Image (cartoon, coloured by chain):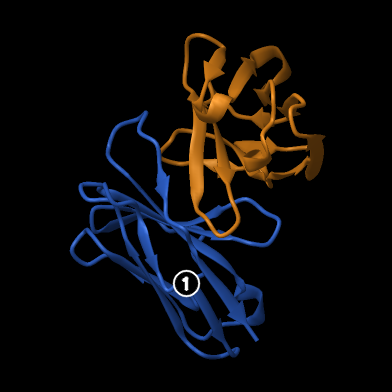
Amino acid sequence: EAGVVQSPRYKIIEKKQPVAFWCNPISGHNTLYWYRQNLGQGPELLIRYENEEAVDDSQLPKDRFSAERLKGVDSTLKIQPAELGDSAVYLCASRTSGLYNEQFFGPGTRLTVL
Amino acid sequence: AQSVTQPDIHITVSEGASLELRCNYSYGATPYLFWYVQSPGQGLQLLLKYFSGDTLVQGIKGFEAEFKRSQSSFNLRKPSVHWSDAAEYFCAVGASIDMRFGAGTRLTVKP
């Protein structure tokens, strides 16, 4: 079974530029998460989707961040414009419904904003 | 509010020695607790989880963890560390649908 796929794995941009990250969850996983992991920290939730609906986006900085999951499968996270403080690893995770089901994580996209 | 504290930022152990990584949590109800491992450039992999029942939980790669409600702790242990165990370890609390992670403990293994 293929795991969670993310691309690109690395991205270097200059500040004020836009950037987008893509995630393909495990087949059949209806719940999808985007996390941000700063250096030396644990992951912090940005947004959670149940199918195509964003059910928890309280931690998403909506002035510059946006996300979509149009068909309830793949998802894209966008930053526009990027700031220096956005440098981090962006992780995608997915799971099936059910209280005890674990989250499966992708390898992440490491973003560097210069 | 739920939160997790991992008091040790970095731990170094010799290969073959025993290991204990500390995790303290704050949670308003019966907690669901998790330990994840993250190798460099990789995503997080679940080592073990606790929902209820036996307070000593066995996981993958020879790891175990013990839930102690009275101490609000969920420490991770391994009796004999291998060089391949060098990684970052994260404790997390909450329902699996919504977890809060600690800051992590980086494990270095000496030959």
Q: Chain B colour? A: orange
Residue B109, quarter of picture = top right
Q: Residue at x 28, y 40 (%)?
A: A96
Q: Is residue A67 above or below residue B60?
A: below
Residue B98 appears at what percent x and percent y? 45, 41
Residue A56 or residue A29, whichever sits in front: A29
Residue B35 appears at what percent x and percent y? 57, 34
Question: Judging from the image, what secondary structure is the residue with disc 1 in?
Answer: loop
Q: Residue at x 39, y 65 (%)?
A: A6
The amino acid type of the residue labelled 1 equals: Lys
Which chain identifier belongs to the blue chain?
A
Q: Residue at x 70, y 13 (%)?
A: B70
Q: Is residue B35 above or below residue B106?
A: above
Q: Residue at x 53, y 17 (%)?
A: B57
How many numbered marks, from 0 up? 1
Residue A70 or residue B50, whichever sits in front: B50
Residue B101 appears at what percent x and percent y? 59, 43
- Of all residues shown, which one is farthest toward the top? B54
According to the image, label 1 marks what residue? Answer: A62
The quarter in which the C terminus of chain A is drawn is: bottom right
* Horizontal side, residue B37 vs residue A65: left or right: right
- Does residue B8 appear in the picture of this structure? no
